[in-house]
Each structure stands twice: as structure tokens, then as C-alpha cells.
Image: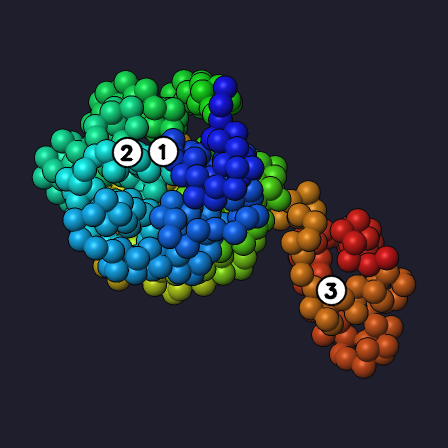
């Protein structure tokens, strides 16, 4: 079989850099997150490029997005736009450049969803031969959904019937495999967020006709979620197993990562801290300044921080994600980050900040009536609402009622008990004074001896010892010394 990499390599060997770039197209869903893509890009970037090669510029935008470098992606996109503006009208090159810019515009985060609809319409209206030359669109970007996939289109939810009238005629031409199941999957996710589970289940059943693997994968994950909330946990698990089987030979690595995140969320809801620890350890990389295809996984990481009692880490992490999701015009993701930040603040004892963050989240989602974003965080959300001045608000009351139901269904969610088994190596941060006290504890000194040695009060020593025990999740001084050695904090 002659692969894209084979064609790229042949073009490079023949001294044809433009041919090497063009050999990557048309792209299939998931290609830019595959091992083959990595090899193609590495080879193409190793040779001088043709400055007039439109396909090379498109590749550089996609490569930058894949590495989370939005500044670099916009640089290459702006060069493409300049080339388009300089090209002569009514020429094949002008048409190619216009299509390239449109094709990339629906992928990068500097357009809101109103402009996104216009860009999709323009792409649909353009010569389809030109559009298909680059490849059809994939709305999931490897995530387990389309509502918040390659784009967060959750603000289409207020007028979804009108949006359907616009989108449904375009879907077969714009997306792979005729776009089967895409709109039904969108509606299933939408109705789930609105807490209309019967309508969500009805549409998810229709979406299961999808033939495209990324879409079918997302359908299985969403159906598993709906059934889990409906009480069919065993059937939900079977669907996730089916999703794993579906993607095991598919080249898009992002779907495997998304499935790991889905399973981690399920485990966190049942109080499995081991799963949360494992997820954090496997996903410790910085998000970069672009994360459309990573947001679901990044939010999962933040949830794992909360589950492990690492509230400060969770708060700072979600604050970073809030800024990223705002810049990418991702309203529902922004709201979810605010809500998780509220949960972390509440659990850390900062109730006023928890109310402030939840208020910001609700302000985003209230026009659309989204409920489950909050209710699926259970008891903590309910407790925050109890302390809000407008707690008699009908929208907040509905969220609270569903959150109370969820907490009865998943009572172990965020029921963290700190002990040494829950502490992750590398996650414990000691202050300079605590480190000094810990070293003296290792020498067997008493509080009075440490006080004299460090020239501080005995009460201050006791304060630092208490903090050390708390951070290490132990009760005794000798346990603290032993565990600190295990973590490499002292020799």
C-alpha cells in the first residue's frame, strides 16, 4: 500500500518539495494526530520549502496547532492571507488560496461561532473540488463529542432548530462519510446538557448510524454517559469497551487519550483516587496556548487534582484554562472551568470565591438552560448554591435539585481523605522553613531543640511540623521522615 509518507518520501528524493507538501492531501480525520503525520512533517521540514507552495503553509499552520503554538499558527495563516490578497482574481491560484484560508479558518480560534457559520457556508458554496483537495472536516478533533469538539458550538443551542435548517444541507458535503450521525450527536449532547435525558437518548440512538470512526467513537462515549446517569452503569461500561475496540487500530492517538479521560472521570465519580493519581502522572505536560483538541482532557486533569485534594493546583490550573478557552471562543468550556474552580475554592474553604466563580459560570450558560455541566459535580455545587444570594432563582434551583440527585447516585465524588497513599511523588511542595524543620526531624531533634537550633519559637516549630504532617498525609513525626525519604525530599 502506497501511504502518504511513501509519497512524501518519493517527492523529497526527487527534489520536489512542493510535491512533498501536496502528498499529505487530501487529509483524513485524525491524520494530524497520527505517527504517519509526525514522520511526514519531520521529513518536509528537513528540506528547503517553496515559498509559493500553498500546501506547505497549510501544513505549517496545522503543525503549529498540533504542538499548541497558536502564535506560530497565526503567523503562517497570516502569510497565507497575504498571498491570497496579492493573487490575481479569477485565477486557479486565487481560488486555491481562498479555499485554503477558509479551510483553516474553521480550525483556528480567532473566529466566533457566528463567523464560523459564515465560513462553513462559504466553504460549502465554494468549488467542492477545491475544498475536497485539502480534505473534509472532522468536528470532534479526537474528543468524545461534537458540541465541544474541534469548536465549542454550545451557543448554537438556543436556536438549534434554526441552526439545523442551515447546517443539515451542508453536512454531507463538508464532513467525511457524508457526515452521518453528526447532527444527531450534536442534539444528543445538547439535550443532555439541558437535562432532557429522553430526548438525548432518542437522538443518540439515531446517531449510532455513523460510519465515520471518530464520530462513532464520540457516539459511543456520549451514549455511555447518558446510560450511566440513567442508572445503567454496566451497559455504560460495555459501550466504553466497544469504543476501545473500535479505535484500537485507528491512527488518531487523541481518541485513545480521550477514552482514558472518560474512564478517569467515571472513576473519580466513584471515589477512585488511584485512577486520579494515574491520570495526573500521565498528563502533566503544559497545555500551550492552543488546546481545542485537548480541552476535555485538560479539564479532566483539573478534576483529578480536585479529587486528590490538590485544591491550589486545581485552582491555578483552571484559571489558566479559563483564559485559554476564552481566547478560543469556547463558552461552555469556559463555564465548566469556572464551575470546577468554584468547587476547588469551596473545598479549600474559600466560600466567597467559590460563589463568585460559580456566578461567572452561570452567567454564561443561563441563556441556554444548561444544567448537567453543574449538576454532575454533585454535592459541592449544591452547597455553593445554598450560599448564593439569588439561590431562589429557578435556574439555580434546577441545578441544585439535579446536583442533589447526582450526589445520591455518586456519593463518593470529591470525598477526599488525605493520607500518604494519596500523595503523588513530586506533588509535595515544602517551604524553605518546612524543609529545614524536616531535616532536623530527620536528625531526631525535639521541638525545643529545633526551636533553639533555628532561633524560632516552639509554637512556630509546632505550626511547621503540623503543616509537614498534613502535606505528607501522615500523623506522626517518624512517619513524616520515612515518607519524605521515600519521596526524595530528604536523603
Looking at the rendering, in which quadrant would you find the C terminus?
A: bottom right
Q: Is residue 375 visible?
A: no
Residue 102 is labelled as none
Label 1–label 2 contact, CB within 8 A: yes
Distance (Cα) linking label 1 and label 3 = 62 Å
- Label 2: how many Cα within 10 Å (few below 14, some 14–19, many 20+): some
The residue that mark 2 highlights is 132
- Label 1: how many Cα within 10 Å (few below 14, some 14–19, many 20+): some
| Mark 1 vs 3, N-terminal side | 1
The extreme right residue here reads 443
Residue 465 is labelled as 3
Q: Where's residue 445, x and y in %? A: 88, 66
Q: Where's residue 243, x and y in %? A: 44, 23
Say what secondary structure mark 3 lies in. Answer: helix
Residue 23 falls in which quadrant of the image? top left
Viewer-side label of 1, 3: 1
Amino acid at each position: 500500500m502506497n501511504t502518504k509518507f511513501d509519497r512524501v518520501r518519493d517527492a523529497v528524493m526527487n527534489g520536489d518539495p512542493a510535491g512533498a507538501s501536496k502528498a499529505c492531501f487530501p487529509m483524513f480525520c485524525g491524520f494530524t494526530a497520527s505517527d504517519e503525520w509526525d514522520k511526514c512533517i519531520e521529513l518536509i521540514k528537513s528540506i528547503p520549502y517553496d515559498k509559493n507552495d500553498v500546501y506547505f503553509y497549510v501544513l505549517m499552520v496545522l503543525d503549529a496547532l498540533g504542538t499548541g503554538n497558536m502564535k506560530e499558527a497565526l503567523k503562517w495563516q497570516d502569510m497565507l492571507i497575504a498571498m491570497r490578497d496579492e493573487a490575481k482574481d479569477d485565477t486557479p491560484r486565487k481560488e486555491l488560496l481562498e479555499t485554503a484560508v477558509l479551510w483553516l479558518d474553521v480550525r483556528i480560534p480567532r473566529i466566533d461561532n457566528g463567523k464560523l457559520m459564515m465560513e462553513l457556508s462559504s466553504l460549502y458554496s465554494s468549488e467542492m473540488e477545491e475544498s475536497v483537495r485539502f480534505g473534509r472536516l472532522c468536528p470532534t478533533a479526537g474528543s468524545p463529542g461534537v458540541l465541544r469538539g474541534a469548536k465549542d458550538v454550545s451557543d448554537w443551542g438556543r436556536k438549534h432548530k434554526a441552526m439545523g435548517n442551515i447546517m443539515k444541507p451542508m453536512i454531507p458535503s463538508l464532513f467525511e462519510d457524508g457526515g452521518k450521525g453528526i447532527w444527531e450527536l450534536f442534539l444528543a449532547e445538547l439535550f443532555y446538557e439541558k437535562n432532557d435525558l429522553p430526548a438525548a437518548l432518542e437522538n443518540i440512538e439515531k446517531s449510532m448510524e455513523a460510519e465515520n470512526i471518530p464520530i462513532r467513537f464520540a457516539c459511543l462515549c456520549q451514549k455511555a454517559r447518558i446510560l450511566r446517569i440513567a442508572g445503567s452503569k454496566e451497559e455504560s461500561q460495555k459501550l466504553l469497551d466497544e469504543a476501545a475496540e473500535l479505535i484500537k487500530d485507528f491512527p488518531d492517538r487523541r481518541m485513545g487519550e480521550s477514552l482514558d479521560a472518560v474512564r478517569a472521570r467515571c472513576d473519580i465519580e466513584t471515589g477512585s483516587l488511584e485512577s486520579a493519581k494515574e491520570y495526573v502522572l500521565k498528563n502533566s505536560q503544559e497545555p500551550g496556548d492552543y488546546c481545542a483538541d485537548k480541552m476535555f482532557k485538560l479539564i479532566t486533569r483539573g478534576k483529578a487534582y480536585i479529587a486528590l485534594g490538590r485544591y491550589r493546583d486545581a485552582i491555578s490550573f483552571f484559571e489558566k484554562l479559563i483564559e485559554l478557552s476564552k481566547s478560543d471562543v469556547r463558552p461552555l468550556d469556559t463555564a465548566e472551568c469556572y464551575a470546577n474552580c468554584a468547587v476547588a475554592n469551596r473545598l479549600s474553604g474559600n466560600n466567597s470565591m467559590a460563589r463568585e466563580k460559580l456566578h461567572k459560570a452561570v452567567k454564561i450558560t443561563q441563556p441556554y438552560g444548561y444544567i448537567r455541566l453543574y449538576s454532575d459535580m454533585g454535592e459541592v455545587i449544591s452547597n455553593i448554591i445554598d450560599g448564593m444570594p439569588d439561590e431562589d432563582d429557578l435556574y439555580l434551583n434546577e441545578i441544585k435539585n439535579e446536583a442533589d440527585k447526582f450526589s445520591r447516585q455518586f456519593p463518593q465524588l470529591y470525598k477526599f481523605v488525605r493520607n500518604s497513599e494519596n500523595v503523588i511523588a513530586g506533588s509535595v511542595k515544602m517551604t524553605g522553613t518546612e524543609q529545614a524543620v524536616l531535616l532536623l526531624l530527620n536528625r531526631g531533634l525535639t521541638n525545643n531543640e529545633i526551636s533553639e537550633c533555628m532561633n524560632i519559637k516552639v509554637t512556630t516549630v509546632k505550626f511547621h511540623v503540623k503543616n509537614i504532617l498534613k502535606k505528607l498525609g501522615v500523623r506522626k513525626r517518624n512517619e513524616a521522615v520515612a515518607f519524605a525519604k521515600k519521596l526524595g525530599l530528604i536523603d
